[in-house]
Image (spheres, coloured by chain):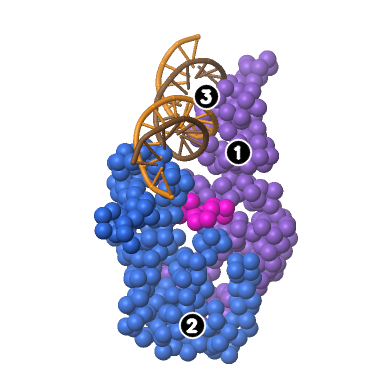
Chain colours: A purple, B blue, C orange, D brown
Amino acid sequence: MEETGLALSKTTRGAQTRALILETALELFKERGYEQTTMRAIAEKAGVALGNAYYYFKSKEHLIQAFYLRMHDELVAAARPILDRETDLRERLLQVMRATVATMEPYHQFSAVLFKTAADPASPLNPFSPESYEARQQSIVLFDEVVAGSNSRLPKDLRAEMGYLLWLYHMGIVLFWIHDQSPGSARTYRLVDRTGEIVVRLIKLAGHPLMRPLRKSALLMISDLKEDMQ
Amino acid sequence: MEETGLALSKTTRGAQTRALILETALELFKERGYEQTTMRAIAEKAGVALGNAYYYFKSKEHLIQAFYLRMHDELVAAARPILDRETDLRERLLQVMRATVATMEPYHQFSAVLFKTAADPASPLNPFSPESYEARQQSIVLFDEVVAGSNSRLPKDLRAEMGYLLWLYHMGIVLFWIHDQSPGSARTYRLVDRTGEIVVRLIKLAGHPLMRPLRKSALLMISDLKEDMQ
DNA sequence: GTCTATAACCGGATAGAC
DNA sequence: GTCTATCCGGTTATAGAC
């Protein structure tokens, strides 16, 4: 209580230094790219010692992790109003996906590095890793809501997996987007529209009696995929 | 002609040194992992100067590229006898995929590094990059043969894309395998069996009149995917 | 063109003093 | 929490030998 008056508490000051380093890093990353930004440059521009930067971020890659968490929050926030507003499944999915791309857009070049790091199975940034559980779960819940809040009906067994399935689908779109060099990520937006169309069609088809064996096979496979992923 | 008797030609000797360095590197990578293997250690064990290692491989990552090309050749070689022997589509696909996993198996931990590098859109190792065109095309042709040599019939429009589609499918399996820590990659083999089943089912379904609109949508999307990929 | 030897540069990471 | 000094390894440079 007493430190509030004169100075910020140690924890707060620590958090501020941390934030300062992170902001500076993100700035420099945007300005000249990840590889070209040295830890020394970050420390210098932030006005702290090199060792201090490492005190707050165990490695250069951990700066990416912090960035990732922030982007994830922005993503969830961008999806919220859409899910509160729309009721048609196609619209819900399309708009959430478009919002995802739009949110990531400013970090396009930088995301390639994020992705490269994330591709390492040993990395905590890997979207399939235990360390990513929290963020992954949030995304899955969000995509589950895309279906839950819509006026579409679909088979119960499939319904249960839709959050995970759409999350997987969204990962594929992100993968494409990272490789997409078209202006304004135009190709990715087009792909979102095309695949959104297909997803909705597939969902409608899935209830057809003719599809039962295939659906059962697919669900079995999905349970294999998820095994050990908690 | 004259140098054949006494000594190996210059080119041959160079190739031998190159091979020696590569073998040594692969050995050390297997033994203690990629990160833990220093270029100095590779040069020392190979009995060459550090500079010489860099003379043949522009960077440490280029050693991975060389490894990748070798694995690719092994993959193609492993598939050949299967394609010459089997006629049933399911068997052709399943056995080629199992052979793929079996071929990669010895390099499991090492492949994670390969994959991490390959995930960078700017990397020549990226499977979607222009530099990978040759290897990618070979793979696609191979998967096209899986269908071509089988006794299955499928719609012409879909038929034309099957090589690419199965290659994409195979990339997904590889992605799963990289994350698979189960003994002997048991989970990946199970996934191959399950997904193989599904692929064959899908192919059979694809010809159904009810499927025409979905198939057309999907093919349109695929042409988007391939655009700019040569 | 192939190779050696050696030193140096650079930047990520760590140790330990304050 | 913050700093300085140092390590380590990928990479480059140089100068010369076969």
Number of the front mark, 3 or 1: 1
Q: Is residue A15 above or below residue B30?
A: above
Alpha carbons under labels 3 and 1: distance apart: 19 Å
**Residue B73 image point, x, y percent:** 38, 66
Residue linked to disc 1: A36
Residue at coordinates 51% horizontally, 62% vertically from top-left? B132
Q: Position of residue B96 (x, y in %)?
A: 37, 73
Report crowding for label 1: few under 14, some 14 to 19, many 20 or more residues within 10 A (C-alpha): few
Q: Tell whether A154 sits left or right of A150.
A: left
Q: Amino acid at mark 1?
A: Gln
Question: Residue at coordinates 68% horizontally, 64% vertically from top-left?
Answer: A187
Tell me the distance, in whole angstroms, between the alpha carbons under discs 1 and 2: 48 Å
Sequence-first disc among 3 and 1: 1
Chain name for mark 1: A
Which x, y percent locates residue A179? 60, 58
Residue drawn where x is 52% and y is 55% of the image: B124
Task: Kindly identify which chain the residue marked by label 2 belongs to.
Answer: B
Q: Is residue A16 visible?
A: no
Q: Residues within 10 Å of mark 2 (few under 14, many from 20)?
A: some
- Identify the mark at residue B45; answer none if there is no mark: none
Residue underneath mark 3: A51
Crowdedness of circle 3 by 10 Å Cα count: few (<14), some, many (20+)?
few
Residue corresponding to mark 2: B203
Say whether marks 1 and 2 touch (CB < 8 Å). no
Q: Is residue A40 magenta?
A: no
In the figure, A33 relative to A88: above or below? above
Q: Amino acid at mark 3?
A: Gly
**Where does the magenta region start and end?**
B114-125
Quadrant hosting residue B199: bottom left
Front residue of B12 and A199: B12
Helix, strand or loop at disc 1? loop
Q: Nearer the viewer, residue A188 or A141?
A: A188
